[in-house]
Amino acid sequence: MVISLSVVVLLLVLAWIFVRGGGLKLSHALVCVALGFYLASSSLAATIHNGFSATAGMVGGFKP
């Protein structure tokens, strides 16, 4: 788990740098995809899923 968490943190930092740099190239997108796969297999996956579900439920509850 320690190695996976280290890889997730490294990929998160790289993705943040790429996005802040303003130019998301193919290699940058591949880093972001790898980050997604590592996050999906980490212990944070349930927390991320619950957060997105709660946000979607809140946005879906708004009436125009």
Image: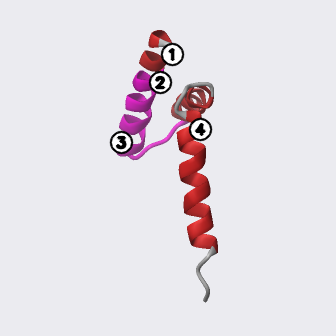
- Label 3 to label 4, Cα distance in Å? 30 Å
Of the two numbered discs 4 and 1 on the same chain, state the one appearing first in sequence. Answer: 1
- Mark 2–mark 1 CB contact (< 8 Å): yes
Q: Secondary structure at mark 3?
A: helix
Q: Earlier in the sequence, mark 3 or mark 1?
A: 1
- SS state under label 2: helix
- Judge whether 31 appears above or below 4 on screen: below
Q: Which residues are magenta?
A: 8-25
Residue pictured at 42% horizontal, 16% vertical: 6
Tell me which amino acid carries mark 4.
Answer: Ala
Dot 2 amino acid type: Val
Residue labelled with disc 2: 8
3 and 4 marks in contact (CB < 8 Å): no
- Work out whether mark 2 precedes mark 3 in sequence or the reverse, and give the earlier one: 2
Q: Position of residue 51 (x, y in %)?
A: 53, 51
Q: Amino acid at mark 1?
A: Ser
Q: Is residue 48 above or below residue 11?
A: below
- The residue that mark 4 highlights is 46
Residue 21, labelled with which disc?
A: 3
